[in-house]
């Protein structure tokens, strides 16, 4: 389990997106027990840029490969240019 952020394409069609994930690095005891691990108090911090996370001790949690189908309906209404 971990956190990751990736951009969803605004162009219609089928897209493959890779999302790199990370997780907070727990204490040695938490890592040995392997019971869920630490979580962020404010999950919105996961969407912050890397510069905002500089104080957190993190470790890589792998990658997630997504295949997304994007439909361009009413995007102009929300300010998304195609």
Image (spheres, rainbow, N blue to C red):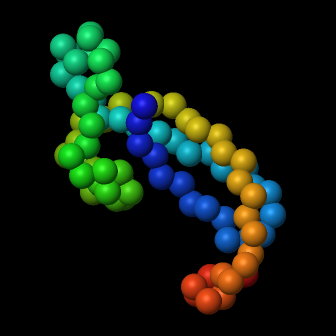
Determine the residue located farthest toward the front in the rendered image.
73
| Position in image of residue 53 (x %, y %) | 28, 50
Determine the residue located farthest toward the top in the rendered image: 32
Tell me: 33 left or right of 75.
left
Residue at x 48% of width, y 52% of height = 5
Residue 12 at x, y = what percent? 78, 69
Q: Quadrant of residue 65?
A: top right
Q: Quadrant of residue 26?
A: top left
Quadrant housing the C terminus = bottom right
Up the image or down, 24 lies above or below 4; here it is: above
Residue located 41% across and 36% down the image: 2
Q: Is residue 73 above or below residue 40?
A: below
Question: Can see residue 59?
Answer: yes
Instruction: Determine the residue positioned at 66% across, 65% down.
Output: 9
Q: Residue at x 57, y 60 (%)?
A: 7
In depth, the one of 58 and 71 nearer the eye is: 71
The quarter of the picture where the N terminus appears is: top left
Vertical comparison of 21 with 68: above or below: above
Residue 51 seen in the figure = no
Height in image: 2 above or below 74?
A: above
| Residue 6 percent location from the top left of the image | 54, 54
Q: Quadrant of residue 34?
A: top left
Please give the count of numbered marks on the rendered protein. Answer: 0
Which residue extends farthest right?
A: 13
How far across and down, in percent of the image, does residue 44 sit?
32, 57
């Amino acid at each position: 389990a971990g956190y990751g952020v990736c951009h969803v394409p605004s162009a219609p069609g089928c897209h493959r997106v890779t999302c790199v994930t990370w997780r907070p690095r727990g204490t040695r005891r938490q890592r040995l027990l392997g019971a869920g691990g630490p979580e962020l108090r404010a999950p919105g911090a996961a969407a912050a840029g890397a510069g905002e996370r500089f104080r957190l001790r993190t470790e890589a949690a792998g990658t997630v490969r997504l295949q997304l189908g994007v439909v361009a309906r009413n995007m102009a209404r929300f300010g998304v240019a195609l």
